Image: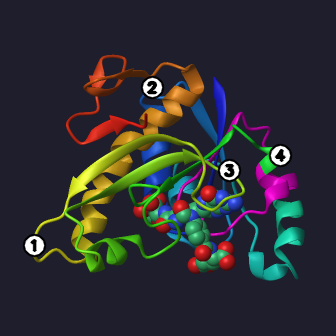
Amino acid sequence: MRRILILISGSGTNMQAIADACQQGRIDGEVVGVISNKPGVLGLARAEAMGIPTAVLPHTDFASREEYDAELKLVIDSFYPDFIVLAGFMRILTPTLVSHFAGKMVNIHPSLLPKYKGVNTHQRALDAGDKEHGVSVHFVTAELDGGPVILQARIPIFPGDEVEDLQERVHEQEYRIYPLVVQWLCTGRLQLTERGAMLDNEILGPYGYAAD
Ligand SMILES: Nc1nc2c(c(=O)[nH]1)N[C@@H](CN(C=O)c1ccc(C(=O)N[C@@H](CCC(=O)O)C(=O)O)cc1)CN2
Ligand SMILES: NCC(=O)N[C@@H]1O[C@H](COP(=O)([O-])[O-])[C@@H](O)[C@H]1O
């Protein structure tokens, strides 16, 4: 059973989707811990309700990003994870920490990377007049949201859409594909086909396609 550690900063709905998938046997892994950089967030309550160990490491307690990441590395290592999953974790990580976990750390980003790296992605897609938007799961590297994309899912943008509409449609795809990617990390089983990514005969569907 692979050991999955999840880092959050907020509501933890993606953490919940992955933890549920583990409990339902859709991921051959267990969530061994949840770390938040913000105290009192809903994601911590979600984890505690599932009996998952939690830790809070406020970035505001540290004088620099480097000092924070040095402590964060120790806390991460204390869980002995096989993989580190960023799920709404809103801190930019230093190259030192990222290189320590190279190939073992993934992130979910609410845009069709390489479009709209950073924050406020839904508003930026609306402002640009895009007809579609989406979500990307990628390996974490020193370059913010620049790591190799593993899997993406697309959503349509309709006239009159607002940020909340995109947020809801993107969340639906997030909860679908993030558990698939984590299962791929745990088992290596993710067939990439012309119809999209397949995992154990589950096709991602028309809006799901593997990065080339
Ligand atoms: N070195 C990397 N660190 C992180 C990556 C990455 O790819 N490489 N992904 C991000 C996740 N992310 C978007 O998906 C993201 C998170 C945070 C920010 C950001 O601007 N953070 C600010 C603080 C914002 C806040 O506290 O609300 C900051 O760190 O100063 C942009 C994008 C996770 N880290
Ligand atoms: N740049 C990172 C970023 O914006 N991540 C986004 O934060 C949300 C977290 O929700 P959650 O805490 O409920 O999982 C998710 O929509 C995720 O894509």
Quadrant where ligand 1 appears: bottom right
Distance from label 3 to label 2 (Cα)? Answer: 20 Å
Which of discs 3 and 2 lies nearer the camera? The answer is: 2
Residue 164 visible from this viewpoint: yes
Which of discs 3 and 4 lies nearer the camera? The answer is: 4
Distance from label 1 to label 2 (Cα)? Answer: 39 Å
Q: Give the residues in magenta.
A: 73-98
Residue 133 pos. (x, y %): 29, 59
Q: Which residue was labeled with disc 4?
A: 100
Residue 172 pos. (x, y %): 28, 52
> Which mark, by number, is residue 25?
2
The N terminus is located in which quarter? Answer: top right
Which of discs 3 and 1 lies nearer the camera? The answer is: 1
Q: Is residue 28 magenta?
A: no
Residue 20 visible from this viewpoint: no
- Among numbered discs 4 and 2, the one appearing first in the sequence: 2
Q: Quadrant of residue 72?
A: bottom right
The residue lying at 88 percent from left, 82 percent from top is 63
Name the amino acid, label 2. Gly
Q: Which residue was labeled with disc 3?
A: 53
- Among numbered discs 1 and 2, the one appearing first in the sequence: 2
Distance from label 3 to label 4 (Cα)? Answer: 23 Å
Mark 4 near mark 2, Cβ–Cβ under 8 Å? no
- Among numbered discs 3 and 1, the one appearing first in the sequence: 3
Q: Few, some or many C-alpha atoms within 10 Å of disc 2 (few <14, some 14-19, many ≥20)?
A: few
Q: State yes or no: Cβ of the residue under disc 2 lies below 8 Å from any atom of ligand 2.
A: no
Q: Is residue 168 above or below residue 53?
A: below
